[in-house]
Image: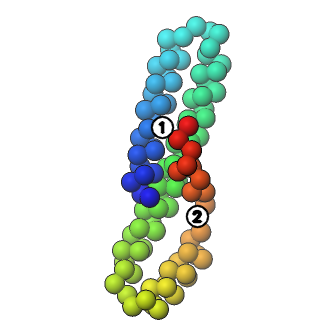
Amino acid sequence: MERELALLLIKNRVEMIDLQIALGDNSSNSVIRLKEQLEGTAYKIRQLETQLEETKLRTAFLQKIGNLPQPSYARKLKKWEHEHPFKTTPAILNSEN
């Protein structure tokens, strides 16, 4: 999940740069549409950055408890998930627009 989020973040950053270039090269008629697309892409990037940080924390925790016996592992994971709920929805992974 962490790698997939990082890849989506890179794709969105490239899209943002392309939009910024297009914004500088286009006539005033399409500037409004390009600015809206740019704002949407910037929003996606902020969401992805937040979700990537949450995923990195979860990965680090899972690595830390990975060798525990199953009952301890399950108990610690349940407690951690209760204390650290995802603030963003994983649905962003399904939307590559």
- Labelled disc at residue 86: 2
How crowded is the residue under tag 1: few (<14 C-alpha within 10 Å), some, or many (20+)? many
Q: Is residue 79 above or below residue 28?
A: below
* Farthest residue, direction left: 67
Where residue 5 appears, x then y in whole percent? Answer: 45, 51
Three-letter residue code for mark 2:
Phe
Q: Is residue 70 above or below residue 89?
A: below
How crowded is the residue under tag 2: few (<14 C-alpha within 10 Å), some, or many (20+)? some
Where residue 27 appears, x then y in whole percent? Answer: 58, 7
Front in this rendered view, residue 45 or 96: 96
The quadrant of the image that shows the N terminus is bottom left
Q: Residue at x 46, y 44 (%)?
A: 8
Q: Residue at x 53, y 78 (%)?
A: 80
Q: Residue at x 47, y 31 (%)?
A: 15
Q: Quadrant of residue 64?
A: bottom left
Tag 1, which secondary structure? helix
Q: Quadrant of residue 37?
A: top right
Three-letter residue code for mark 1:
Asn
- Labelled disc at residue 88: none
* Farthest residue, direction front: 94
Q: Which residue is mark 1?
A: 12
